[in-house]
Every structure is written in structure tokens, then in C-alpha cells.
Image: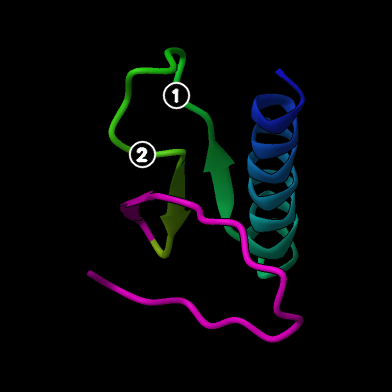
Amino acid sequence: MLLMRTTQRKGDIAVAQAIATFTRKGYDVALPMTESAAYDLLVDADDVIYRVQVRYSSEKDVELRRI
């Protein structure tokens, strides 16, 4: 049970940091209402809505990738 909680905590940290990063850049961020969505965030950047899937990384410098 502890491993699952640690994994969930890392995911929560990653999503929170992503929200903070996109918000600092001036973008609007929305969260899906369900856990079953294929994405973690919606980001409205310059009138374009992007579906964003967030991954945790222990690295300090990470980059955004489009897949």
C-alpha cells in the first residue's frame, strides 16, 4: 500500500508543478472531471486547447515534449 501511495504522491506533485508552470506562463489550465480521461490537464495557450499528460521526473531540468 505504501508504494501505491508514494506513486500517487509523485503524480500529484508532477501535476501541481505542471499547473504552476503553465499558469506562470500566462496560460489557463483546466482539470478533467474524471480519472478516466486520457490526459491530466487542458491548457489554453493562445486560443488553442492542448491535452497534456504529465509524468513525474526526479530531474531538475525537464523539457516539454510533443508526442
The secondary structure that dominates the magenta segment is loop
Kindly give the residue lying farthest to the left in the view shown.
67
Q: Secondary structure at mark 1?
A: loop
Picture quadrant where residue 5 is located: top right
- The answer to whether residue 53 is left or right of residue 37 is right
Which stretch appears magenta?
Answer: 47-67
Discs 2, 1 touching: Cβ within 8 Å: yes
Kindly give the residue lying farthest to the top in the view shown.
34
Three-letter amino acid code at the position of disc 1: Pro
- The answer to whether residue 7 is left or right of residue 54 is right
Residue drawn at the location 63% of the way across and 42% of the way down: 11
Residue at the spot of label 2: 39
- The answer to whether residue 10 is left or right of residue 37 is right
Residue 4 badge? none
Residue drawn at the location 56% of the way across and 44% of the way down: 29
How many neighbours does mark 1 have within 10 angstroms: few (below 14), some (14-19), or many (20 or more)?
A: few
Mark 2 or mark 1: whose residue is earlier in sequence? 1
The C terminus lies in which quarter of the figure? bottom left
Q: Is residue 26 above or below residue 52?
A: below
Residue at the spot of label 1: 32
Tag in front: 2 or 1: 2
Residue drawn at the location 72% of the way across and 70% of the way down: 58
The N terminus lies in which quarter of the figure? top right
Three-letter amino acid code at the position of disc 2: Tyr
Q: Position of residue 56 (x, y in %)?
A: 61, 57
Residue 5: say if magenta.
no
Q: Secondary structure at mark 2?
A: loop
How many neighbours does mark 2 have within 10 angstroms: few (below 14), some (14-19), or many (20 or more)?
A: some
Q: CA distance from mark 2 to mark 1?
A: 8 Å
**Residue 33 versus residue 56: which sits nearer the camera?**
56
Q: Is residue 64 above or below residue 8?
A: below
